[in-house]
Amino acid sequence: MKNAKEFIWPLIGLAAVVGSGILLHAELKDMSMASLWASLASIPPNRYLLAMLSTLVAYGALAWYDRIALLHLGVGHISWLFVSVTSFTTYALSHNIGASVFSGALVRYRAYTSKGLSAAQVAVLVALCSFTFGLGTALLLGAVLVYEPELLSRVADRLPAVLANPTTARIVGFVLLAGVAAYVVGSLLRLKPIKIRGFTVGYPQPNIMARQLVAAPLELLGAAGIIYFALPEAGNPGFLIVLGAFLAAFSLALASHAPGGLGVLELVFVAMMPDMDKAAVLAALLVFRLFYLLIPFAMALVVVLMFERARLARAWRESSVPATIPPVPTPPP
């Protein structure tokens, strides 16, 4: 039974890729490859540069996730460089391969245990980083739905009428913001931990909470900025709509367990941009995949190989050192 469970999420991810691919093909059947390449070529160099800078902001904020979690654990001896490289490698791999296949927890475990952290501490770090991402998503999506409640009406033909209704969207936005506010109040008042089915969720110190409220939105704004800067001005609905569409598409892509959210991200985002040229939208998504997923993935593979090679070389050196035998004391005459 345990072995069967190991195949469930990969199968779900594969089904999500196939299903999304079929739907995306139907969505883009009238688009030619020539128009796609023309859209990529039409993006000005300065917009590519801005997209690249947005990528650096996003990955810099992701490194901050780990640093915040280490501060929560009271760990201060690990350098920013090591934390940044570990965080970059973790997210570059897990975003592309999928958390169900190659968990980011494994990368962090290998890295942080080499610096003296226990398995329990790494588990807390991983959980807090995941929660920080969820907190940022709730905060930004809630704000977008309150300010732009017509966001879901852009896909009104694909959703039940009650969900596409701006009033419903605004209510959902307020609920999300209320959840974030409850977390902030719990941290400020130092409330007792919440127990859910035997699992204890404790509120962090206010200084940790404040850092989370800055780092998480910063990462998501950077990631959404990659797409926004790659989109043309014609028909562009504005950054808030692009941000809301990205949050919805990226969250569903992660939930699908599809490797890299392949197909799911494109399907949702294209559907939420009905007034824009589909080739231009897909070109922007390809830029996002290149800058945020593929280039970091290639770099992360190199980092993992170098790290494991160094650990293997160290283990080999330690095993090659001959054991020293203490001299036998000479008995007194």
Image (tube, rainbow, N blue to C red):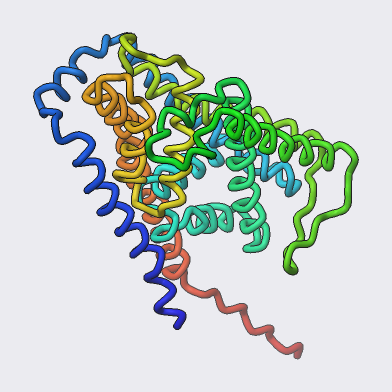
Residue lying at the far front of the rendered structure: 161
Q: Is residue 239 above or below residue 191?
A: above
Q: Quadrant of residue 15?
A: bottom left
Residue 203 percent across, percent down from the top left: 79, 47
Describe residue 201's horizontal placement relative to residue 268 as left or right. Answer: right
Depth order, front residue of 165/31: 165
The residue located at (62%, 29%) in the rendering is 170
Residue 64 percent across, percent down from the top left: 60, 34
Residue 275 percent across, percent down from the top left: 32, 19
Q: Quadrant of residue 330?
A: bottom right
Q: Is residue 227 above or below residue 161?
A: above
Describe residue 55's horizontal placement relative to residue 44 as left or right. Answer: right
Depth order, front residue of 99/238: 238
Q: Is residue 326 visible?
A: yes
Q: Is residue 56 above or below residue 12?
A: above
Q: Is residue 66 visible?
A: no
